Amino acid sequence: MDKWKQKERPLCLERRFEFDCYEKTRDFLDRLGDYSEKKDRYPDISFGKTYVNITVRPLDDDSRELTDADQKFACEIDLLSE
Amino acid sequence: MDKWKQKERPLCLERRFEFDCYEKTRDFLDRLGDYSEKKDRYPDISFGKTYVNITVRPLDDDSRELTDADQKFACEIDLLSE
C-alpha cells in the first residue's frame, strides 16, 4: 500500500499509475471498469495518454476513517495494473 | 459549442457531461477512447460513476489560442455523447 497516499479533508487514498503508451493505459482503464462494475464501486479517476490517477474514498460517505475494505479495494486496483 | 467553457492559464476548453448510470458513462468513455486513438489526440479526462469532465488543450502546446481544429475536436466529442 506504500504507493497510495492517504489524504485528509476529504479523507481518501490516492495513487498515480504511469504507463508507457496509451494502449496500456486503456487496458488498465478497461480492467478498472470491469472491476468497478463487479464491486459496484466507482472511484474518481482522471487520466491522460499515459497516466491514471485514482481517488478511493471511504465506502461510507460519513466515515472518518478508511476501513480494511477500503484498503483491500485499493490493493486489488494495484493488482489490475500489473 | 456553448457548453464548453474556455479557460485561460493554461488555455483550454472544458466540458462536463452527465449520465444517468455507469453503463452510459462507460459507453461514452469507450467511444472517446476509440476517437482519441483515431485522431491520436488524448485530452485530459476525469470521471466518476455518472460524470465525465474533459479538458481540451491547444494541439500546439505553445499556442496562445485555440484553433478551428481544437473547436472541431470538441464538437466531435459532443457528437459522441449523443
Image: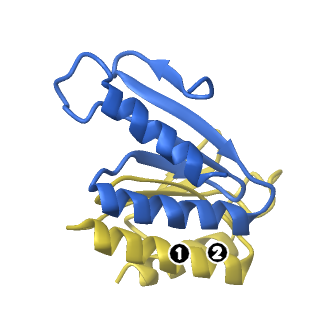
Chain colours: A yellow, B blue
Q: Depth check: give the residue in front, A59 or B41.
A: B41
Q: Is residue A14 above or below residue A24?
A: above
Task: Please name the residue shown 83% across and 51% down the image.
Answer: A62
Say if labels 2 and 1 share a chain.
yes
Task: Please name the residue shown 48% across and 45% down the image.
Answer: B76
Q: Amino acid at mark 2?
A: Ser
Q: Depth check: give the residue in front, B34 or A50.
A: B34
Question: Can the viewer see residue A58 in this picture?
Answer: yes
State the residue position of label 1. A32
Quarter of the rendering containing residue A27: bottom left
Q: Depth check: give the residue in front, A11 or B28.
A: B28
Q: Amino acid at mark 1?
A: Leu
State the residue position of label 2. A36
Q: Are marks 2 and 1 in contact (CB under 8 Å)?
A: yes
Q: Percent x, y for residue B35?
A: 41, 59
Q: Residues within 10 Å of mark 1 (few under 14, many from 20)?
A: some
Q: Percent x, y for residue A67?
A: 69, 68
Quadrant in which the C terminus of chain A is drawn: bottom left
Q: Percent x, y for residue A40?
A: 74, 75
Q: Residues within 10 Å of mark 2 (few under 14, many from 20)?
A: some
